[in-house]
Amino acid sequence: MKHLSGDGRLSTGRTVALIAVLSGLLALVLRLYFVMHAQVLQDVDRDPFRGDASQYYHYAWNMVHRGVFSSALPTAAIATPDSFRDPGYPLFLALAMKLTSSFATFYGFVLLVQAVLGAITVSLLTLAARQWLPVRYLAVSGMLMAVWPHSISIPAYMLTETLTGFFCAVALVATDFASRSGKRTEWAIAGLMWSLAAMTNAVLLPFATALGVALWLSRNVGRRAALALALASLVLPAAWGMRSIELPSGASSTSRAATNFVQGSWPTYHDAFQLAAQGDIDGIHHLQWMQSEIDLLQKDPKAGLAVMLNRMSERPMTHVTWYLWKPALLWAWDIRIGQGDIYVYPTRNSPFFNNEPLQPLEAICYIANPAILALMLLGIIVVIFRRDTPVVAKAAALLLLFVTAIYSALQSEPRYSIPFRGVELLVAMGGAIGLFGWISQVMSRATSRKAG
């Protein structure tokens, strides 16, 4: 921690703790303000309501009332087990349901807890970066994580993003501790934390293994530590996989991955979704064509891939351009599969609407978003090529590369980047440090030449 302050380890530790607490408190105030003022139209307890949130609620309801993990409607006579959705978030909702006595109290409890988890995430990420970013940059990144509009609004939705972001923050802190202690037990704990994130969002399932391999190849950790990280991260998913192995293929998470893979290969998917949501017949037909490809891919993968490749070959440059654009789309601003802007479901009385108190904040962040993305890319390059970079910084950079690659191959949607926005801001701050350092070197050399 010597690079952070000249006042010694104790004073720096106190400064970092203060930054973590203050940024967390700011985050808490803003998230509570949003969930208590915004009115989100997500009637998940009503059968006609459709969407991810509805399915998560049904899973939780069936676990509490029927003891089975199923997306069946509460009105259904039989709840058939499935694993289409990951179990982490439904378990969180089921616990909330057990602790409350009515839907109204359950709903309010979930949103308030999510607001608290979002705030804790900011503090944890600040602590994770304490060995990596100088104090003043740590303070700026803590403030940005606290005020970023996507992160403020997402706790108001009954979706996985808040919980996934929280577990990723916990895992990064655990990874930091393990890297400094070097003990296999702590690497195993870090792996377990990554597995909790993966059980909430299966996209992260291979990440801890990939991280362990990368750290071993770069000689940041030994082979046994890398194995402890990887194996511990697979314990919970393996147990869940054993439970799901005999379920019908169409009811598994593999089926959902196939769906996202096909949808993500259509450059027109987001537009078709929006049109279909408005009742447009062309949009509905477009989604039906996509569904026919999905069904074929699940029934006969070889034939399904052949159909997809044939479609792409008819307009090759369109699809090449589309896939090149998908990484930037993931980190773009407007949510595509939803209401647009920072809203997933219809939302009224948002503090970010025009003439509301937080509207100027959103405007500033909206303008800064492309620059944040550019600095994130620069930060990843800095982390990869600097030998003295802390392990936690490498883990953060690899996490961003990993999720960008996976979502670019599947379905790229700005909502999916929300759990990782805090990590993006930390890595972007590292990129800013690298950029300022380079500018300083260039100016110093120019001054030296003039003096000579």
Image: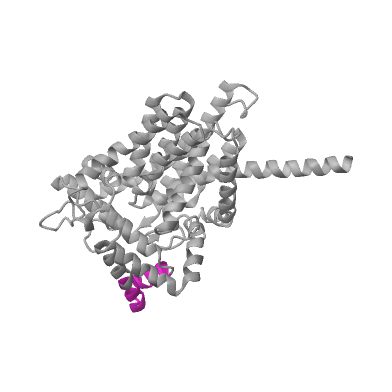
Q: Residue at x 49, y 34 (%)?
A: 128
Measured as percent of width and height from the top left, residue 134 is found at 61, 34
Which quadrant of the figure contains the C terminus? top right
Measured as percent of width and height from the top left, residue 49 is found at 26, 62
User: What is the magenta segment's predominant secondary structure?
Assistant: helix
Measured as percent of width and height from the top left, residue 177 is found at 45, 28
Q: Is residue 319 visible?
A: yes
Q: Is residue 382 toward the left or the right of residue 204 in the image? A: right
Is 277 colored magenta in this rendering?
yes
The correct choice, above or below, for 159 with respect to 9 in the image is below
The correct choice, above or below, for 230 with respect to 254 in the image is above
Q: Is residue 212 toward the left or the right of residue 250 in the image? A: right
Q: Quadrant location of residue 40?
A: bottom left
Q: Is residue 146 visible?
A: no
Is 382 colored magenta in this rendering?
no
In this view of the protein, which residue sits in the foreground, 133 or 400?
400
In this view of the protein, which residue sits in the foreground, 238 or 127?
238
The correct choice, above or below, for 264 with respect to 433 in the image is below
Q: Which residues are magenta?
A: 268-288
Q: Residue at x 42, y 47 (%)?
A: 419
How is colour applied across the structure in the image? one colour
